[in-house]
Image (cartoon, coloured by chain):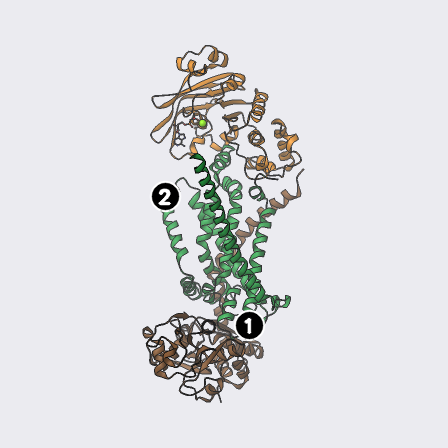
Amino acid sequence: MMIQTESLGVQYGSSIAVRDATLSVETGRITAIVGPSGCGKSSFLAALNRMTDLLPDAHVTGRVTIDGTDIHGESSSPHDLRRRVGMIFQKPTPFPMSIRRNIQLALREHGMRERAALEATTERVLRDVGLWDEVCDRLEASALQLSGGQQQRLCMARALALEPQVLLLDEPCSALDPIASERVEALIRELRGRYTMLIVTHNLAQARRLADHVAVFWVRDGAGVIIEQGPAARVFDAPRDPTAAAYLAGVQG
Amino acid sequence: MFGPQAVVAEHFRTVSKTLIWILLCILAPAVGCTPRTKVMHDHQESTTQPASVLSGRLTVTGSSTVAPLVAEIAKRFEARHAGVRIDVQTGGSGKGIADARNGVADIGMASRRLKAGERDLVAHQIAADGVGLIVHRDNRVAELTAAEVVDVFTDRSNNWQEVRGLDLPITVVHKAEGRATLEVFLNHFSLANPQVRADVIVGDNQHGIKTVAGTPGAIGYVSIGAAEAAIAGGVPIRLLPIDGVAATSAQVAAGAYPLTRPLNLVTAGGLSPLARAFVTFCQSEDVHDTVVSQHFVPLAN
Amino acid sequence: MSRRTARIASVRERLTAALIWCVAVVVLGLLGWILVDVIVRGADGWSLSFLVAEPEDAGRAGGIGPIIISTFLVLAVTFAVSVPLSLATAIALTERADRAALDARLVRRCLDVLAAVPSIVLGLFGNAFFCVALGMGYSILAGGLTLACMVLPIMIRTTEQALAAVPDEYRLAAAGLGLNHTSTLFRVLLPAAAPAMAAGIVLGIGRALAETAVLIFTAGYVVRMPESLADSGRVMSVHIYDLAMNVPGGSAQAYTTATVLVVMLLLINTVAVALLRLAGFRHVAGGREA
Ligand SMILES: Nc1ncnc2c1ncn2[C@@H]1O[C@H](COP(=O)(O)OP(=O)(O)O)[C@@H](O)[C@H]1O
Ligand SMILES: [Mg+2]
């Protein structure tokens, strides 16, 4: 068991976004999180690397352990946690600086100073995301000059540079055109096994293509809950929850 | 693989951050200390030096009319006495008198006589400045009586026809409160400032000259030296005589022209040798050429 | 009916466009007129020696060498103080959980009041506080510090707006990479906000260069070449004012000095842009094109 949440709850002020979410994520596997908008998927994901700490009125209950350690425990700092648990957002967010600096910024922050090591890592992760051949001759160019799909892959490279164990992907393809989306999906598939990945997606076909495990979120009594989870094949072919069954069949949602 | 531009950018960032810190560190103590030690230093200098060799520093503040003249004189004085520095500052006659009184300045400058409440100070006249009434060059009126001037400035006459001129509305150009020429003018005609119905309020002489030159029906009052210089430079204005005396520098120097003001240096209490020497120099014939070149009238010794 | 509406809409659109063009032309024309007027009148006295020589005959002859130096020194003091201060204040106002907290609102209100203080009042304050109370006398230091008080409100406001305009996504993305608050601020947010902040500084320089009332009472009137920040030094705007207002026959030199001032402003603007490029901030300014 790599990531384990126990009765995880997220609330903003008095409104509850996620209630009682218990989920196990296996090492090296891809877990897809699906469900209609506003059912707490992003909130759930944000709780896993303590991005919820940044939202002033967000409050997290329950327990999250990664490799057995409680992420809210005394010994764990959010900065180290976020280095180990990378996050990719729906909207590509390269910083307004050069491609090279986008990747090396966090590396320096986490203690890598040697120029040779920095350059080697830059090349490695850009190759990993298939961007090296496209940008190797213009690493000094602004990252904002890249296309949307390239920007998203740069963001993934930036996260991979920190050698995380887990990648949280919050609708990584939904702001991209079909071809760029296809490339990012292919990239995720290539990274299977090397990283434990949780991906939120609205694209059920994509979830079916990618996921080893699936969790379906739904709003019940004004809060997001997990109504169905399990191995992808089982969830898609024989869902137990009738709402989930209808949603996955494309009737609802 | 590491481009030169990246290196430059990196250095620029480090350098600029360091610079800011250094500047902060320098400025923080400088705010408190530097000038104060300097002032003390000067005092020591002026007390320990023998009186015959002039050295040290003087601060002269006050009238913005007198300041350009005194600054020129100070430059000449500094050239003759290597160890002397004279800083001339402006801010108006009022400030000159206040600064001289409370010791902020060694010498004040005022472009007016001292008032009754200022008898604790000593005025040292260095030149005279006549205040002359000016009208546009095309204005036909040759002279106004004192009563007519009062009528014009209090709006009892509002057209040049009423004072032997053309059918043209009168534009009264008045000075802003606090101007030395304003006080000279009001005193001479026994007017109180609120009585004056001004159409235009101007700051100083040049402003007044420009306004009158640009308005055919205007009348105003400025320094005669400034007006003469402007007329010589082709500006379309004309000086009106007062009580039958032509408004010229010569008449001011001769003491015949009534509407004049003294340009004074003002001091309080005991003068340092340096201050005394400078005041004497300002009143000497050595600086008459400078006085004339500033369009003022030197004193006949 | 719909055709009619469409036609009216198109007429309105054209009218609006024409109006905008008219306004733009008027504004540009006015600016051009002022510039040409100043430069044409000032061009006569323009020479290299004018830039280095000392003024003679109350400024009617000679040049403005010491005055240019004093101006630069005053500006240096002003911005050495106001840039870090405004940066710190803007960060304190922006980079916090609650941007509308009481103390933040209070600080903003105070800054608005400070911005509305007429410069003559600020000049008298600077004279009383820096020159007299702190014993600096008429000095470049006192002038620069008073001027810093004057430009602080605009500089803080532009810096604050620049920081607030940085998308929150950058903050989240930076946190997602494990950057702490300080690194996020210095490595991500400030670089992203730098061009707008630079624009604020250039605006501040513009205001500072034009300021007369503040400096006549603080930096002073002395035209000697300054030897230190404790010396009094006349800045260009004061010189222009003095020549135009107190020195008969000084207006030609006033225009020449004004020309130098205008050219200097243009130069500072250009240099600021160039420096930003060199520092790698072109990534924001450049945008997506090229
Ligand atoms: N920062 C926030 N502050 C307050 N409420 C929020 C915040 N983020 C999300 N919510 C609310 O929490 C609920 C779940 O949102 P979210 O986790 O973004 O769902 P999803 O990602 O499934 O669309 C929604 O009702 C949303 O309005
Ligand atoms: Mg979401």
- The reply to whether residue C226 is visible in this rendering is no
Q: Nearer the viewer, residue A48 or A75?
A: A48
Can marks 2 and 1 be said to lie on one chain? yes
Q: Tell me the crowding category of disc 2: few under 14, some 14 to 19, or many 20 or more residues within 10 angstroms, Cα based.
A: few
Q: Position of residue B36 (x, y in %)?
A: 47, 66
Q: Is disc 1 placed on a helix, strand or loop?
A: helix
Disc 2 from disc 1: Cα separation: 53 Å
Q: What residue does disc 1 label?
A: C59
Is residue A187 shown left or right of residue B62?
Answer: right
Q: Nearer the viewer, residue C123 or A147?
A: A147
Tell me what hue chain C is rendered in: green
Q: Is residue C97 above or below residue A60?
A: below
Q: What residue does disc 2 label?
A: C101
Q: Which chain is brown?
A: B
Q: Quadrant of residue C35?
A: bottom right
Tell me what hue chain A is rendered in: orange
Is residue A10 shown left or right of residue A180?
Answer: left
Q: Position of residue B142 (x, y in %)?
A: 43, 83
